[in-house]
Image (cartoon, rainbow, N blue to C red):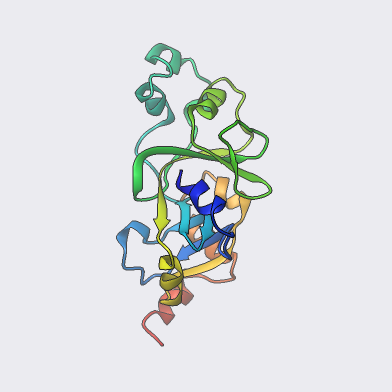
Amino acid sequence: MVFSTLTDKCERGFLDGQFLIAMPGMQDSNFARAVVYICAHSTAGAMGFIINRSQPISFTEVLLHLKLMDKAEAIMLPGPTRDFPILSGGPVETGRGFVLHSDDFVSESSIPVSDEISLTATLDIVRAICAGRGPARATMLLGYAGWGPGQLETEISSNGWLTCPANEELIFDRALEGKYERALALLGVSPEMLSSEAGHA
């Protein structure tokens, strides 16, 4: 797994546990107005998840696709489970699912991201969520954002991203509308301030 490769072989980097907030001039459409939670950063590269982009697929559809239950069983799931959030985590491996979650759920494949947040990419957590045994807070993401050695540092130095310490409330906030603005507010910045400065040295 990319995450374990980045964390096991190298010392963790200064962007671990940080938010990346795209600047208005971001050239890559994959990251326009994106807020990215960086889970792993080292000399080998970086990996994270976009936390403010919806995915046009429901949790029920994921369960049916994975054949974890049939339509009749899916209909019987509690409303909060059926409405479990699915986000578009990034442009890499978009068919692969990951779950960011609070550390009250642990499986053999769970990897700590911070003191409070873990990452699990196996079906055991999906089964636990369906059975009501899942973590208190969680979000499923399809795909991830990845950068090669030095690539992200170059993008930041080229004024592509703002950075700030991640906020757990914002990571799991289901209200995606306005999440970009709320992330900027962590820095005391508004989109208007950035727009007015765009293009100036």
Location of residue 76 with respect to 106 vertically, above or below: above
For the C terminus, the image quarter is bottom left
- Which percent across, then down, holds residue 142? 40, 41
User: Taking 58 as reference, is 76 left or right?
Assistant: right
- Which percent across, then down, holds residue 159? 43, 75
The foreground one among 165 and 52 is 165
Q: Residue at x 50, y 33 (%)?
A: 84
The foreground one among 57 and 156 is 156
Location of residue 193 with respect to 183 vertically, above or below: below
* Circle count: 0
Q: Residue at x 52, y 59 (%)?
A: 41
Location of residue 73 with respect to 182 vertically, above or below: above
The foreground one among 9 and 21 is 9
Q: Residue at x 45, y 76 (%)?
A: 157
Say whether residue 1 is visible.
yes
Say whether residue 160 is visible.
no
- Which percent across, then down, holds residue 7? 55, 52
User: Taking 46 as reference, is 116 left or right?
Assistant: right
Location of residue 75 with respect to 196 vertically, above or below: above
The foreground one among 184 and 68 is 68
Q: Residue at x 58, y 59 (%)?
A: 12
Q: Give the farthest residue toward the bottom.
A: 201
Give the image quarter of residue 197.
Answer: bottom left
- Which percent across, then down, holds residue 95? 34, 38
